[in-house]
């Protein structure tokens, strides 16, 4: 079933969903099953699986020289999606990015997904690779997520890249895209970012999932701004609890989001790491309860390998 069909079926009830990361190369599928086994009691209708493009690393050679090598540390997104659907009978949402893909490779990946019966996809641009100062698209690939959305929407109309394909099978992908309550870090301002987000919806995106945020006002204001400019698709809040003191600096640096002073002060005063975790859990529970009371379609939790914490939160939120 499509993500938007799950929202429609829920009839106003707030759903809960999770995002998981593929294990590091060499790891086992069991790590994903261990995470999800403990979260299945909450009946998530869908599970997102992130996509990780290759990264550059520097390896030291016996000669003493460094060699720049491209490796994919977390492959397996499509296989994990198929395994999740098979084992849990829930829908899987693979993330698909522009970075590293030619349009042809994207088309082939979408054909694989279609043949596997996966009809949801979160369409993203992806970030710059490590050691690159900006996002560089594949020479034959897409520069922005909106271009990827257009390609998927075209396939939903039976239009493939090869114009000689007539009467091509129409895929039926439900397309999600990313949204940024605190604006995307590269955007010159909030309104411009909103303009491009609207473009993604006009190109065929069916719903938006937000970047994490720690102040619900940011989400509510974002939804209001989206509605004001004519974006009327469901907007799913993305949530992540703080569980470690060092995240006070790593989360803003990695995700370009701010942390409310009240939360920061409480964490700074916490006597130990367990107290930090409890403060983070409490904060996320309160965020979730308020969002649920406001009738959001779904609470989407970024598990980031910490199923135990997410389980504690969702249990208390009671979805
Ligand atoms: P876009 O929508 O293309 O926007 C990128 C920037 O370009 C923005 O500043 C936007 O304002 C601007 N822009 C957009 N369109 C245009 C245009 N036509 N002309 C000029 N400017 C434009 N990354 C991964 O690598 N793998 C994942 O699995 C993954 N999952 C994610 C899940 C969620 C819910 C979120 C919020 C992010 C995720 N990311 C993931 C990170 C994402 O790839 C980065 O945030 C990336 O920098 C932007 O992706 P986007 O799809 O929002 O890009």
Image (cartoon, helix red, strand yellow):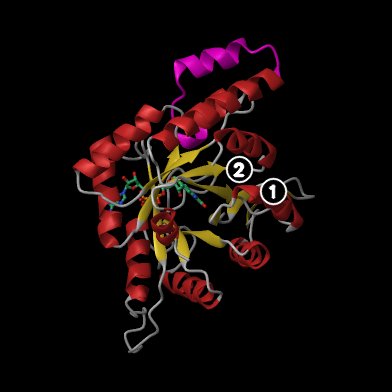
Q: Is residue 16 above or below residue 104?
A: above
Q: Residue at x 26, y 37 (%)?
A: 224
> Mark 2: which secondary structure?
loop
Q: Which residue is mark 2?
A: 303
- Image quadrant in which you'd find residue 165: bottom left
Q: Residue at x 75, y 45 (%)?
A: 64
Mark 1 crowdedness (10 Å alpha carbons): few <14, some 14-19, many ≥20: some
| The one of 49 and 132 positioned closer to us in this rendering | 49
In the image, residue 114 lies in the stretch drawn in magenta: no
Mark 2 Cβ inside 8 Å of ligand 1:
no
Q: Is residue 319 above or below residue 126?
A: above
In the image, residue 255 lies in the stretch drawn in magenta: yes
Residue 35: give its label: 1
Bounds of the magenta segment = 253-272
Q: Looking at the picture, how far across and down is residue 173, in whole percent?
A: 41, 68
| The one of 20 and 136 positioned closer to us in this rendering | 20
Q: Are the residues flagged by discs 2 and 1 in contact, CB closer than 8 Å?
A: yes
Point out the image quarter for the C terminus: top right
Q: Residue at x 60, y 47 (%)?
A: 42
């Amino acid at each position: 079933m499509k993500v938007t069909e799950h929202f429609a079926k829920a009839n106003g009830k707030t759903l809960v969903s999770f995002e998981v990361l593929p294990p590091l190369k060499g790891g086992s599928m069991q790590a994903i099953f261990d995470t999800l086994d403990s979260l299945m009691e909450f009946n998530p209708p869908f599970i997102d699986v992130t996509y990780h493009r290759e990264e550059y690393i520097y390896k030291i050679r016996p000669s003493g020289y460094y060699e720049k090598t491209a490796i994919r540390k977390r492959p397996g997104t499509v296989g994990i999606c198929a395994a999740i659907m098979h084992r849990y009978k829930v829908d899987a949402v693979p993330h698909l990015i522009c970075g590293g893909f030619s349009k042809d490779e994207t088309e082939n990946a979408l054909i694989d997904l279609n043949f596997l019966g996966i009809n949801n996809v979160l369409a993203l641009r992806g970030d710059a690779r490590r050691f690159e100062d900006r996002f560089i698209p594949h020479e034959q690939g897409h520069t922005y997520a909106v271009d990827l959305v257009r390609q998927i929407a075209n396939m939903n109309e039976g239009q493939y890249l090869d114009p000689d394909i007539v009467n091509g099978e129409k895929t039926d992908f439900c397309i999600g895209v990313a949204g940024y309550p605190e604006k995307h870090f590269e955007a010159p301002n909030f309104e411009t970012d909103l303009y491009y987000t609207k473009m993604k919806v006009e190109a065929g995106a069916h719903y938006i999932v937000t970047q994490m945020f720690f102040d619900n006002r940011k989400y509510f204001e974002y939804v209001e701004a989206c509605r004001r400019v004519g974006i009327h698709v469901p907007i799913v809040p993305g949530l992540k609890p703080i569980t470690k003191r060092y995240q006070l600096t790593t989360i803003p640096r990695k995700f370009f989001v701010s942390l409310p002073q009240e939360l920061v002060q409480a964490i700074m005063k916490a006597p130990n790491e367990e107290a930090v975790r409890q403060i983070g859990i409490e904060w996320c529970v309160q965020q979730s309860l308020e969002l649920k009371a406001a009738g959001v379609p779904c609470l989407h939790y970024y598990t980031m390998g910490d199923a135990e914490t997410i389980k504690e939160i969702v249990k208390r939120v009671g979805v």
